[in-house]
Amino acid sequence: MREVFKGVTSHSIYLVLRSSTTGMGLTGKIHSDVTGSYTRSRAARTAITMATLASASAAWSSGGFILVDDTNCPGLYRFDVPDAAFATGAGVDRVIVSVKVTGAIEEHIEFLLTDWNKQVASIPNAAAEAAGGLFTRGTGAGQINQAANGMIDTNPVRLNNVAQSLLDLKDFADEGYDPATNKVEGVKLADTVTTYTGNTPQTGDAFARLGAPAGASVSADIAAIEAQTDDIGAAGAGLTAVPWNAAWDAEVQSEVADALNAYDPPTKAELDSGLAGLNDLTAVEVENAVWDAVLADHLDAGSTGAGLNAAGSAGDPWTTALPGAYGAGSAGAILASRSSQASVDAVDDLVDTEVASIQTTLGSPAGASLAADIAAIEAQTDDIGAAGAGLTAVPWNPAWDAEVQSEATDALNAYDPPTKAELDSGLGTADDATLAALVTLTALVDDLESRLSAARALLLDNLANLTAAPPTAVVIADTVLDRNMATGTDSGSSTVRTVRNALRPGRNRVHVDSVTGVITVYKEDDTTVAWTAQGTATAGMDPLTEINPAG
């Protein structure tokens, strides 16, 4: 068993392939002759993709395989095992590398995965007293001095990464530290602070720090901002009135062009060409037909006529008095409940409480005052406008490409205009061409009717003249048996056992090869082979070699 360090990489192994018949070294094998694999502890076999190497001294390459020296080391090969075979894994302590070559004894090499890399000079992998190495006993660099057993000399020079010796701490303790109380004596704080640096003096009251609001109050300013920011909605869902940005034109045009190219509807020129001469209804005629239609004839459930009829007979909801008698949850009940004085008073009390809380918890403004900060914010939110109407410079988002193209495709699919191919197919014989085809078809139908009439008359005449009785079974059998086998057509295969092929050995030429025993049966011309079969000779008898009715 070989040993290898867990997690070792770029590891090459050497193995000897021996002939499965002679046991000698097997030479001349290349990577394509090898089936390589490895099996880790309690795991299934993993196939290795074999590859060639430029030379026996080439750099490691996963799955690399090459002979070392067929002349001086016959049968010795180098195999670069993939890193995954020796990777560290829970419960994995050994790996078996297998090599299978046709004509060679199979090789199964077991590796024990060790936690100790025996290839390093020391543990850790660095010289003692050097960087990354172990300390030794002594007074030199990289050594720890031990004045006596159980003791280690130390000389700290930094505390919390700040230069500080133990002598400084000792001096501090000697002057004021009392071990009895664990306190440092001699330190007294003054009754008042006369000098305090690093602070920012605070003057005035909270109202002065708030500054003058832009509107009636700070709350009003905040409410104005909130009204605008509420319009934005979650992830911009409320921005329903964002104006078109001219910078989007090229993007949308590109996506629509992609969708049109993919769908391939006909162009105007193609429509004009395909529809030329067709008697289509004008837009005015269609319009008049729709608007002059009687609603009573179009009242199916869910139809436009039913919807128009219902809308025309409905009352005006804004003429209904509030509060009225409305059920819970209805629009009338909600509007009535929210218009009461008690609701207004409750909102007023809540606003007073919240304003007092805001005045208590407001911190220092980033600018001259909170009002100034709010004004700066409002200057930006004003640009948003109602429902995003002011966002005239929002750049195109490439992530919208797929959405716009998808919507354009959905619209085309819902409208279902004909593609160019469909139009070409549908209008290829339209109009004059269709009329010409109909004339031709009419002529063909007339000719067919004439031919059918003549055939019917001929059939009737033949039936009238048919007086002989139908042939009997004997007559049919005699006719079949007397039929010349040279007439008619074979089945097309010499291996099909037809009646014709079964009768041929009894009447046609048959040849038996005295050496191979092959029997050849010929067709009626005694020259063309009909079929062959393997015969068996009986010892002690002269074989039959030929039957030739032609002499």
Image (tube, helix red, strand yellow):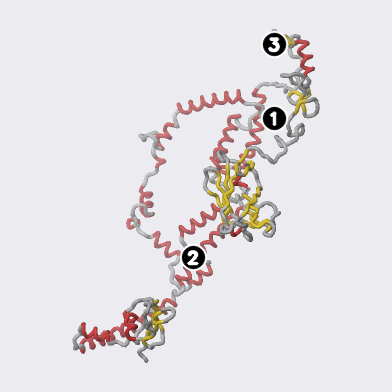
Q: What is the three-letter code of the residue carrying label 1?
A: Ala
- Left or right side of 303 for 169: right
Q: Earlier in the sequence, mark 3 or mark 1?
A: 3
Residue 374 percent coordinates (x, y): 63, 33
* Helix, strand or loop status at disc 1: loop
Work out which residue is located at the far bottom of the displayed protein and give it.
Answer: 551
Residue where numbered disc 3 is placed: 182
Depth check: 348 or 418 in front?
Answer: 418
Residue 12 percent coordinates (x, y): 65, 49
Q: CA distance from mark 3 to mark 2?
A: 95 Å
Mark 3 or mark 2, which is nearer to you? 3
* Helix, strand or loop status at disc 2: loop
Residue where numbered disc 1 is placed: 368
Q: Is residue 423 above or below residue 218?
A: below
Q: CA distance from mark 3 to mark 1?
A: 50 Å
Q: Earlier in the sequence, mark 1 or mark 2?
A: 1
Dividing the picture into quarters, in which one does residue 524 lie? bottom left
